[in-house]
Image: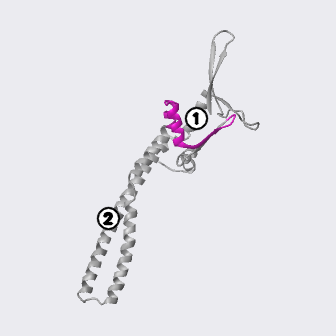
Amino acid sequence: MTGERIHRKLKGGGFNDHVYYRCANNHPDQNHPKVRWRAEDLEYAVTKDLQRLRLPPEYAGWFRKTLSAAFNNISETAARQQKILKKRKSELENMQEKLLNAYLNGIVEQHVFEAKSKALKAELSDLKKSVEATEQFDPTKGEGAICIFDLSQKAADIWGCSNSTQKRQLLEALSLNRSVSDVSLCVTKRKPFDILAEQTIFNKSRGDWT
């Protein structure tokens, strides 16, 4: 959409300015809808849409606390798993060394050595993959999730005190697509903002969330 300022002369003297937003296509076909929104109406519609992201006070604090606790639990679990896996990896490497020494000293026959060595290598290979998987966990994801949630709760307020460039950035961060008809605004939210906007989980839930 593009904005345009309409400068109208009043009967009693003076002028009145109105800002409208319309489709940026200057050469629409016959079937193209003619849509024009007053700036204040569009501002109100966007603000109202962003307010849908805001959870009721009785849910917001609980959700933020639960989100933080969940990521902390994941981080702690990943750290414990990594410690256990690394310990087992060290044990397997020691077993490989002892097996090799036993074979070289003639204590273990060749066919036994080969079978045991193959089994240890296979287990060690799987273990290394598991260790790498736990190391790939990024503990800062929890901080990012909290920041995203905080943004969703403040989005309407941020919109109200932002300039046009900042407003565009906010809409692009929160949504995939925006469109208007002659009477309504339609915004397709990005994940997880779409879930917050619908608030399906909270509307269906029961119980004490505090």
x and y, in percent, of residue 120 in the image: 35, 78
Q: Residue at x 67, y 34 (%)?
A: 25
Side of 161 where 110 appears, left or right: left
Is residue 119 found inside the magenta-colored segment of the image? no
How many residues crowd around disc 2 within 10 Å: few (fewer than 14), some, or many (20 or more)? some
Instruction: State how many labels appear.
Output: 2
Decide if residue 130 is in sight here.
Answer: yes
* Residue type highlighted by circle 1: Val
Q: Which residues are magenta?
A: 155-183
Residue designated by label 1: 46
Q: Residue furthest front?
A: 27
In terms of image quadrants, where is residue 110? bottom left
In front of the other: 110 or 74: 110
Point out residue 197 in the picture as x, y percentages from the top left corner. Answer: 56, 44
Residue type at numbered disc 2: Lys
Note whether 116 is above or below 154 in the view shown: below
Q: Residue at x 29, y 78 (%)?
A: 96
Q: CA distance from mark 1 to mark 2?
A: 49 Å
The answer to if 170 sits in the magenta stretch is: yes
Secondary structure beneath disc 2?
helix
Q: On screen, 15 above or below 161? A: above
Position of 143 relative to 116 (above/below)? above
Q: How was the colour assigned to the protein in this rendering?
A: one colour
In this picture, is 84 found above or below 171? below
Q: Can residue 55 be seen from the camera position used here? A: no
Q: Are marks 1 and 2 in contact (CB under 8 Å)?
A: no
Give the percent coordinates (x, y) of residue 172: 54, 41
Tell me which label, 1 or 2, sits earlier in the chain.
1
Horizontal arrangement in the rendering, residue 88 relative to residue 181 (left or right): left
Which labelled disc corresponds to residue 83? 2
| Quarter the N terminus occupies | top right
Judged from the image, the secondary structure of the residue bearing numbered disc 1 is helix
